[in-house]
């Protein structure tokens, strides 16, 4: 079976064509600047890379370019009919969906209704869904949500201590994001632990960053909230702050609420504190060059991840493994070392050599003496979407 995985943003479309017989990637690509002067179309088809620029009016035009590239003599398909199903990343499920869902008029209308919870993302995801349904109307299509892995959180973990009516009337609560990554990485960690009952913390540390606490494969808590702004300090997001900061900043600076929210999402975090960059590589280099703010930004990031590790150990009453994933988690031995330093008091101890040697690949990097196992597990969100598409696209 061949599954087309689509991740549509407001002006972008990312895709993978996966052969589910061996879970191999036949083609992948990223189209950016859809609807602007010239779109940038980067693709790797059967291992061959290409990059071209062309004006693309909308997501339907972008999808047509993708399908044209997938079909032909030096392409993985002879006809688009060989695509068996399409899986779509959708950011927010609200409380409506606890699992992935097969798309039809009813479920699409429900996703439209949830859009006020993710006004920047769900409408963009829906553009991709509608473009696909126009071109491939007879193929099963499935929505796979960023939030649904976290739907197993108990109410005492997902509720905010606000007037209860805000939850009842507007479903204001913690939802969590990066769910496909947390699902993939926690289940790989569980396999590495021997498939028994387990308590795992997944550290998804990329530009966006979140932790989840997972007991026997089920998420019991996660750091992101109603939106991805809550939790860890990130590349450009503040993470947890005192909510009163918002009004105070507005009074002091004259910023509007929109400008202040934009500041918290785009100008804060590692970028805001360091004043250098949102990219950890740049900030680590600046620290080496003696930049004190860069050093402070990294220390803050590390300290906050450690605090959440400690709190999730308490929430789960124990811990079998930590799994690092995403850009920083997979590729930065130095940050992993700093994240695990001085955690021997709670049973976490790295093997320095294994940590240094494990970059962008699976590995166990804890020392033999460590009570808690530490893994590096490269995430694979597209594969989760493809697996879910098969699971929900063909069920009655
Ligand atoms: P996104 O959230 O955009 O999907 P990624 O998971 O791709 O992010 O992670 C991107 C981040 O990973 C970059 O901002 C960069 O800081 C970080 N990163 C990637 N490689 C390294 C590395 N070798 N050392 C430190 N940081 C890295």
Image: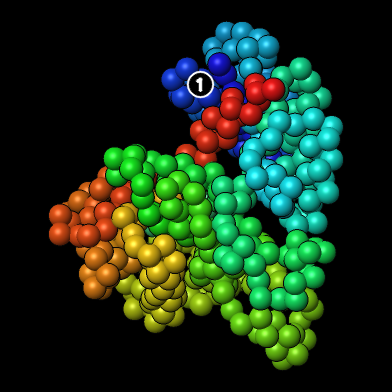
> Quick one: quadrant of the N terminus?
top right
Q: In the displayed image of the protein, which residue is found farthest to the bottom?
A: 252
**Picture residue at 20% right of the left edge, 51% below the top:** 354
Classify 268 as above or below 87: below
Rendering quarter of residue 160: bottom right
**Picture residue at 33% right of the left edge, 66% below the top:** 339
**Picture residue at 64% right of the left edge, 38% below the top:** 100
Helix, strand or loop under label 1: loop
Rendering quarter of residue 297: bottom left
Q: Quadrant of ligand 1?
A: bottom left
Q: Using the image as rendered, state which of residue 165 and residue 386 is in the foreground.
A: 165
Where does label 1 land, which residue?
A: 20
**Picture residue at 61% right of the left edge, 71% below the top:** 267
> Quick one: quadrant of the C terminus?
top right
Q: Using the image as rendered, state which of residue 313 and residue 92 is in the foreground.
A: 313
Rendering quarter of residue 299: bottom left
| Residue 206 in picture, x, y percent from top left | 48, 56
């Amino acid at each position: 079976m061949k599954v087309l995985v689509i991740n549509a943003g407001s002006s972008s479309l990312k895709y993978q064509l996966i052969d589910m017989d061996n879970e191999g990637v036949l083609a992948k690509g990223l189209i950016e600047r859809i609807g602007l002067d010239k779109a940038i179309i980067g693709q790797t088809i059967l291992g061959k890379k290409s990059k071209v620029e062309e004006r693309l009016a909308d997501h339907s035009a972008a999808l047509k370019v993708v399908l044209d590239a997938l079909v032909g003599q030096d392409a993985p398909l002879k006809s688009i009919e060989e695509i068996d199903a399409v899986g779509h990343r959708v950011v927010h499920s609200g409380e409506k969906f606890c699992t992935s869902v097969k798309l039809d008029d009813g479920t699409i209308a429900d996703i439209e209704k949830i859009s006020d919870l993710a006004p920047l993302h769900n409408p963009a995801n829906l553009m991709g869904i509608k473009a696909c349904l126009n071109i491939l109307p007879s193929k099963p299509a499935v929505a796979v949500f960023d939030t649904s892995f976290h739907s197993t959180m108990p109410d005492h973990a997902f509720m905010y201590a606000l007037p209860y009516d805000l939850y009842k009337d507007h479903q204001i609560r913690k939802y969590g994001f990066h769910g496909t990554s947390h699902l993939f990485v926690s289940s790989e960690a569980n396999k590495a632990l021997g498939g028994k009952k387990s308590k795992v913390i997944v550290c998804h540390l990329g530009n966006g960053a979140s932790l989840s606490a997972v007991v026997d494969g089920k998420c019991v808590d996660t750091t992101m909230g109603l939106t991805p702004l809550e939790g860890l300090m990130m590349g450009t997001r503040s993470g947890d702050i005192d909510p009163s900061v918002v009004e105070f900043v507005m009074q002091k600076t004259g910023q509007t609420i929109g400008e202040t929210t934009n500041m918290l999402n785009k100008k804060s975090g590692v970028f805001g504190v360091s004043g250098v960059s949102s990219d950890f590589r740049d900030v680590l280099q600046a620290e080496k060059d003696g930049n004190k703010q860069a050093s402070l930004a990294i220390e803050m990031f590390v300290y906050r991840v450690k605090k959440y590790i400690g709190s999730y150990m308490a929430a789960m009453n124990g811990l079998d493994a930590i799994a690092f994933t995403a850009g920083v988690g997979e590729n930065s031995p130095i940050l992993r070392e700093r994240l695990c330093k001085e955690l021997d008091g709670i049973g976490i101890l790295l093997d320095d050599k294994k940590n240094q040697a494990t970059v962008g690949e699976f590995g166990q990097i804890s020392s033999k003496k460590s009570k808690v196992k530490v893994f590096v597990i490269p995430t694979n969100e597209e594969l989760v979407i493809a697996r879910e598409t098969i699971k929900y696209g063909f069920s009655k």
